[in-house]
Image (cartoon, coloured by chain):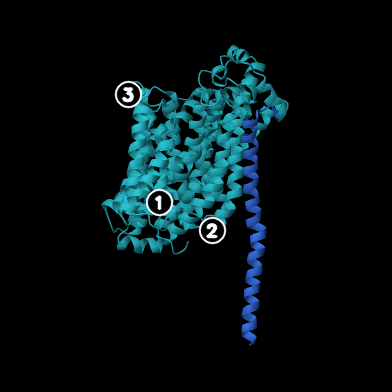
Chain colours: A blue, B cyan
Amino acid sequence: MILGMDIWVFSAWIGTILAAVLCLFYGIYQWYIKKSDEKNLSERKNDQSKKKGVK
Amino acid sequence: MEDVIFFTIFMILFAAMFSFLGYLGYKKTKTAEDYFVAGRKMGAIVIAFSYGATFISAVALIGFSGISSIYGHSILWLAFLNVFIGILIAFIFYGFRTRKMGLSLKALTLPELLGNRFNSTRLQSVSGLIIAIFMVAYTSAVFLAIASLFQVTFGISYELCIIVFTVVVGIYITVGGLYAVMWTHAVQGILMLIGMLILTIGIYVMLGGIGPAHEAAAGLTPEILESISSPAAIQAPGGLTSMPPIFSQPFMMILTLIFGAGIGVLAQPQLITRYLTAKNEKALRMAIPYGEIFILLMTFTAFSIGPLCNVLMVNNGLMYPGTPDKVIPLIVSELFPQWFVFLFLFAVLAAAMSTASALFHTAGASIGRDVFEKGVMKGISHEKSIKITRIATIVIIAATLVISLNPLDVVAFMSAFFFGLMANTFLAPYTLMLYWKKTSKAGAWAGMLGGFIFTMFWYILIYFKTAPQIIGSSMIDNYLINMLDPIFIGLPLSFILTYTFSVLIKQNKDEQKIMKKSFENI
């Protein structure tokens, strides 16, 4: 028994919490990491277009 | 008398707030796109709350908590599927593609998406008709449950409750379209969250925290459960916090509940509409964590506290009420302060109203746009399109009102069919349409009709809950078969039929052209 639940019920209990945490991480990844990736990408594009402009 | 005054004041406030949101929606609704998919301008939080509030009805809050008081915590597997499949898989594997394909094909409803993808207005009309007919029955069942609850609590007549709820919801949907529906969902969702959070925390605090509460539930022997007349004495043979023995009757019941509702969610037309409302893909991506928090706080809490109600009944000398639907109302009315009883009732009312408004809107759109505009009165203007859908929505609301005031047995069966029927009818053609470019019109028809006919046949002749009430007894006496949700057989069958007929009767040139167009943004 874990927290008063048998292993199968505990798996469902912890599985639900882990699935929720996964969704949260997905949101954080989308918000911060992807955002900075997109920012880097747009900065790189700006740099490239500036260089092209100089040439 | 005080109760009735409180009910009246709160109902007037509810009606005024929702009517105001309906008015704002009306001001914003200029085109058919505005009315059907809120102008495709919705952000992450509104999408998440609207998806959650549509998904979680009063049945899930009250009904499933009650069911978990009988079968124990094993029903938490449904909470896992609700979060994992109902949110994560649904948005990532269905939401993004549905939105993109909807944009490419200019589709505003699920039937329209199917119809445009397979170049068949007939497919659209038939899908719309199936959705509308069964949705009316489902909506009346939602109202029936909530009106009965209010009748018991406030002593107000059932008929008056039904009329008030239907008219309030009807006004803001018909006037404000999906804008009003989604904005009211945000308000209703907050009320639901507050209600469920206080209820869950209150119950765990009464029982000394998570560990002690679950240990107390595990310690309830069949004899103790029998002393309060709890059906859990028989239905949870291994205890309230253990899985029942594999292939036992309670195990089959849990299996049916978990997979029927857990997977069926992927093909619910009223939920699919939410994907089409997103202003961009980022809004859908960000709706995942918000939606997950909402669903977690609704289902995980509801299914966790159900079994604990048995402990509370034993500790407080209460007897198990006649049906599982009355378990949570009993605990709330006996063990919580009066202010919370009112708050919780209105949280449940918010859950019922949010689901009903989404169903009314989808059913109205199915009849107005999919059946009449595209099937009967082709080529009409946008203004006329909205007008026809508004009239169709009023007709749907009136039909629901009449059915709710005169509930027939057939309506109860049809509402029980709803989840499984939608999944077995639409999930296969919808999934293959999004992922397999060779899916043809013939395949979509075969999968859709095959799934529909099989499910009706299963519910009428075999399924243990519905068949005995329709034909007297199930045609198959073995509970391992008659307790199976039709999704276990109907869904694979529908996939096989869609695939086989797509291979046998291939796409014609027109279909190929549309297929290329539908995948151009994916």
Residue B253, position as x, y percentages in the image: 49, 27
How far from the left and from the top, in percent, is residue B201? 68, 32
**Is disc 2 surrounded by few (<14), some (14 to 19) or many (20+) residues within 10 Å?**
some
- Closer to the chain start, of discs 1 and 2, is 1
Identify the image quadrant of the N terminus of chain B. Answer: top right
Label 3 close to label 2 by CB (< 8 Å): no
SS category of the residue bearing label 3: helix
Q: Tell me the residue that label 1 is attached to.
A: B109
Q: Nearer the viewer, mark 3 or mark 2?
A: 3
**Relative depth, front residue between B383 and A6:** A6
Q: Nearer the viewer, residue B87 or B154?
A: B87
Look at the picture and state if B441 lies above or below B80: below
Query: Do discs 1 and 2 belong to a common subunit?
Result: yes
Q: CA distance from mark 1 to mark 2?
A: 18 Å
Residue B459: where, in percent of width, then height?
37, 31
| Chain of the residue where label 1 is placed in the rendered structure | B
Q: Which is nearer the N-term, disc 3 or disc 2?
A: 2
User: Residue B511, can we see it?
Assistant: yes
Residue at 48 percent across and 38 percent down: it is B353
- Disc ID at residue B471: 3
Residue B171 in the image: state x and y as whole percent: 43, 43
